[in-house]
Amino acid sequence: METILEIKQVSKTYHNANNTLTVLDQIDLSITKGETLAITGPSGSGKTTLLGLCAGLDSASSGTVALSGITLNELNEDERAAVRNQYVGFIFQNFQLLPTLTALENVMVPLELRGAKNSKTIALGLLEKVGLGSRSHHYPIQLSGGEQQRVSLARAFSNQPAILFADEPTGNLDAETSERIIKLLFDLNKDAGTTLVIVTHDNELAARTNRIVKIKGGSIIADERLIHA
C-alpha cells in the first residue's frame, strides 16, 4: 500500500520565559492511501496540534512530516500553502466559511485557487450532492449550522484532495444533524477514494473509521485497526 503521510519522531514544544511545554513527544505515524483514521484522546492531549502538523498548517519543533512524498519541514509558508491547495481538504468544527461569499462562492474558492476552468459547474454539482443545490446563493448567515457544515463538506471535496482532515466535524451540531453530516462525509469520501483523518471526541464516529489512534499527554498510547462487517 502506498503511504500518503509519514510522520517520524515529531515533537512540538512551546517556549515562554519560564518554561517549556511539550504538546507532542516523538510521534511516529504512517498513513496509507485510502485509509480512514480517527485520532482520539482527552482535551489537551495534542490531537489538534498533530492534525495541524500533518496538514502543514504548522511546523514541528523536531522530526519530519512527509505528505505525498513531500517533506513539509523543508518548505517555507508559501510552499506549504501550495502543497495544501494541491493535496489537502479541511473540515472544521466552526465551519470556517467566508461570511461575505455565498454557499456557491465558498465552494468555488479552492477550485479558483487551482485555476479550474469549470469551477462553477463543479461547485454546483457538489452542492447538489450535499442536498443544497437550491441554497447555493444563500450566505452562511442564512443557513443553519448543519447546512453550513454541508457547504464546508462540499468545499473540502471540491479540489479532489488526496487527504482530508476533519477537526471535530460534528462538534457544534445536534445528534440528528451530526448523523446526517457523518453519513455524507463517509459517502463523499467513499466516492472520491480520499484518505480521511478525523480528530474527534465522538466514539461512535471514530468507530466508523478503519483505524483509531489514541493520544494522551502528547504520545500515541494505542493504534487499533478495525474490521467492519
Image (cartoon, grey):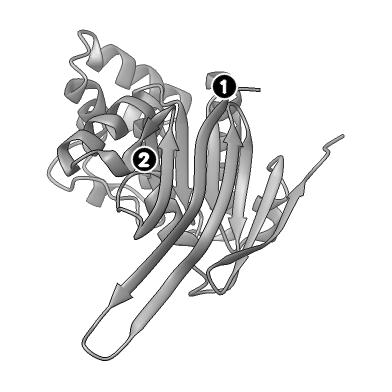
- Residue at the spot 34% in from the left edge and 81% down from the top edge: 20
| Amino acid of disc 2 | Ser
- Residue at the spot 46% in from the left edge and 36% down from the top edge: 164
Label 1 residue SS:
loop
The residue wearing badge 2 is: 152
Give the image quarter of residue 216. Answer: bottom right
The residue wearing badge 1 is: 193
Left or right relative to 3: residue 69: left
- Residue at the spot 25% in from the left edge and 28% down from the top edge: 110
- In the image, is residue 75 above or below residue 143? above
Left or right relative to 16: residue 72: right
Q: Is the residue marked by circle 1 packed among few (<14), some (14-19), or many (20+) residues within 10 Å?
A: some
Label 2 or label 1, whichever comes before in sequence order: 2
| Amino acid of disc 1 | Gly
Indicate which label's residue lies in the foreground, 2 or 1. 1
- In the image, is residue 8 above or below residue 214? above
Label 2 residue SS:
helix
The reply to whether the C-beta atoms of the residues labelled 2 and 1 are less than 8 Å apart is: no
